[in-house]
Image: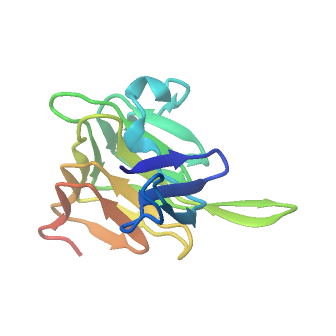
Amino acid sequence: QFSLRMTVDHIFECDMPAIYPTSSSSTTFLRLTTVGTAIDFTDFLSCSEYSSYSAINYSITTTTQYPNQNLFIDGNVEIISGILDLQGCRIVVNPHTPPYTITVKSGGTLIMNEFELINSSGTTHIPTHIFACSTMWGGIINDGGTLDLYAAKTAFTKIEDALIAIDSEGGNVQVRYTTFDHNGLGILIDGTN
């Protein structure tokens, strides 16, 4: 037998039967415990769990900043000109056929980085995290624009669940301290600086 429990205080406990029980009348368990502070629950939640998130602007023509916000994408996003600046955001992409994408046109810029939360306890770096709530999303398409994905070493930007996380057919791409997870393909670059 194998049991798994997740507690509110973020302690992960795993009990596994010992190979050699100490007596025939009882089973001895080995305790393995790990403490985590950043547990990703996104794979366990349905799309309805994100109903409190705010809609992102689908047509960007000026500088648009989203600092430390919960956002959802329920349509294709186009950065025609100007800047879409995502700072420490959690962005869920709703399912659709064909899958939704974020497209950066020539003259547009997408920035994804961390948000610095400063309070009496010190500074916390909150990463930007984009993911799908059920089926995979299309990913980020760079069509001659600028992608600037960077973060602190302690708060990596994370792109998950995309068919192609970054598909760049021209323009500039800068990626630093970014995690690509559960994507069909991480980065596809053709004719990009």
Of 66 and 182, nearer the camera is: 182
Q: Which residue is rendered at x = 53% and y = 30% of the image?
A: 54
Q: From the top left corner, tell me how far across and down residue 137 is, in percent.
A: 25, 41
**Quadrant in the rendering for residue 118:** bottom right
Can residue 120 be seen? yes
Can residue 57 be seen? no
Q: From the top left corner, tell me how far across and down residue 10 is, in percent.
A: 61, 53
**Quadrant in the rendering for residue 116:** bottom right
Give the answer, above or below, for where 181 lies relative to 178: above
Q: From the top left corner, tell me how far across and down residue 104 is, in percent.
A: 30, 51
Q: Is residue 176 left or right of residue 134?
A: right
Of 24 and 9, nearer the camera is: 24
Q: From the top left corner, tell me how far across and down residue 33 is, in percent.
A: 56, 64
Q: Which residue is rendered at x = 25% and y = 36% of the image?
A: 100
Count the marks: how many?
0
Give the answer, above or below, for where 167 lies relative to 155: above
Q: Which residue is rendered at x = 51% and y = 69% of the image?
A: 151
Q: Is residue 142 left or right of residue 80?
A: left
Pick out the residue farthest to the right.
Answer: 120
Pick out the residue farthest to the left.
Answer: 190
Of 166 and 94, nearer the camera is: 94
Pick out the residue farthest to the front.
Answer: 24
What kind of colouring is applied to the model shown?
A: rainbow
Q: Which residue is rendered at x = 40% and y = 68% of the image?
A: 178
Q: Is residue 135 left or right of residue 65?
A: left
In the rendered image, which quarter contains the C terminus? Answer: bottom left
